[in-house]
Amino acid sequence: MIDDSPLERLFKNVRSTHLEHLPQGTSVGRIASVLCSFLNSGGGTLIIRLESSGKTASQVKETLELNIRQRVRPAAFWTATSEDAADGGYCVFDIPAGRDRPYSADGRIFIRVGTDTVAAKEAEIESIVATGYQEIERWERRPLSGEGLERLDREVILETARVGSERRNYRFTDPGEMTAVLTDLSLYRHGAATNAAEVVFGVRPAIQFPQVRARVTVYAGGKGGDFIDSRTFDMSGFKSLESVLDVIRQHIPVSSTFPAGLQRTDRPAFPEKAIREGLVNAFVHRDYSDFSGGVSVDLYPNRLVIWNSGELPPGIKIGDLNREHPSMPRNPDIAQVFWLTGYMERVGRGTLNIVEWCIASGLEPPKWKSNQTGVTLTFQSRRADDPALLNVRQLKLLEELAPGTSIRLPDFAKRYFVSERQGRRDLVALVDGGWLSRKGDGPSTRFVRMSQKSSNPAKPGHTRP
């Protein structure tokens, strides 16, 4: 492991109420008790030095994780990651604040007192139970009305169990039985499926919960106004997220350069993994109890804006999103399913990853804003003097149109399934950027592929067909 790796830097941090380091040789019972204390006391990060044992850090982590999940009750959402090193490596547990307090490890309840993990006293247990009751009644845990199981997609549920077992080493009581899988995920309680079950596995969840809808709008200009594309998706969580991401992929500008003649190098205006992480956060953390809420994405030529209903959790401020912070997911049951299926990795690290990926792509750090209506994440594109940003249609045309050949506006619109109005915008931008030249006037206007990018692009106003 390199000395300045994220885990190494985290291990060097000072111990605090929400951060604990445990040395090599620490017993599994001790690790479970610390993890339990974080669940009961606002969450935290637990870092363990692993001994050299002939096994990889990942193998040790999997065994350790399974053992701890068997010791801590009730079942809770937390994640574990590992990193190899010459001396054994690290295992990192990211533990959100538990929503089903009190939690116990080997039958005992533990809490954090300052930087120490201690067994809870009777009065402290009573306090945890009293404050935790309302959390149990959160929206995602409420039972579905009617025969809720009939509205769920059985195949997706069983596939989630299969993926969770293989990818996350998660042990299900009966991975081939739908109700058993839902019960293990806290999505089937007291003889009924929960609201969260319909959000993530519903066949048509928007019929009962219109707030699950997600909208994406692609604007022609930087200030809104005319839009190129606008769609609304009302499917289950995973399907809606992937559908939104597909629309973004179709329209996201791409920085395209030709450093070696016609050999093109492309770079999306925004890193896709940062966009995906931002969407996952929006879907997982939005306020599903608000029937007027939802998720919306607005894509402009110079920025991408993701909004979700619901404020930041109490105790979390905007500035915390740019550094290590305790995770307090609004919907831990929904978050756990997203984690099992690989949409989330380390809980609590999503916002930090978004910042790091944007900086690595040459972008300014994204900006978050939170108010009573919701949380907004804004990505800004590169500087105006960056190489021309092209969309997918423009890139395909440059690939398919041989140098010296041409295309007319109606043919472009028909080939790429856009209106002539949008097609004109695309072709004019390519002329302005020096990729195409304009020949003729009026309906006979043709756009000719240049043999290489022109150093003298057309002047504004001279390209309208």
Image: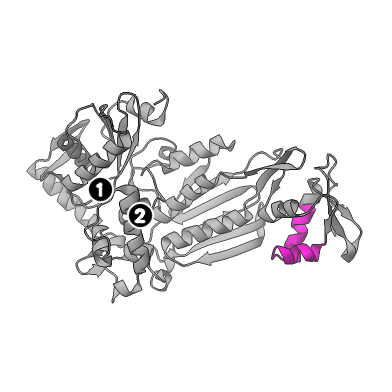
Q: Quadrant of residue 416?
A: bottom right
Residue 387, given in percent of the width and then of the height, sits at 71, 40
The numbered mark at residue 312 is none
Residue 133, given in percent of the width and then of the height, sits at 19, 56
Camera-side residue of 361 and 340: 340
Residue 154, given in percent of the width and then of the height, sits at 34, 68
Residue 256, given in percent of the width and then of the height, sits at 69, 43
Callout 1: SS: loop
Q: Are marks 1 and 2 in contact (CB under 8 Å)?
A: no
Camera-side residue of 24 and 378: 24
Q: Residue furthest left?
A: 122
Mark 1 lies on residue: 98
Q: Residue shown at 16%/35% (left/top)?
A: 30
What is the span of residues highlighted in magenta in the rendered image? 408-429
Look at label 2 and name its amino acid: Val
Q: Is residue 367 above or below residue 170?
A: above
Residue 418 magenta-highlighted = yes
Camera-side residue of 299 and 403: 403
Magenta region's main secondary structure?
A: helix
Residue 56 magenta-highlighted = no
Look at label 1 and name its amino acid: Gly
Task: Tell me the quadrant of the picture where the C terminus can be found.
Answer: bottom right
Left or right position of 208 against 115: right
Q: Residue shown at 51%/46% (left/top)?
A: 273
Mark 2 lies on residue: 163
Count residues near mark 1 (Cα–Cα under 10 Å), then give few for <14, some for 14-19, many for 20+.
many
Q: Residue shown at 87%/54% (left/top)?
A: 438
Task: Report, in whole angstroms, how far the alpha carbon at label 1 lies from the one at label 2.
Answer: 24 Å
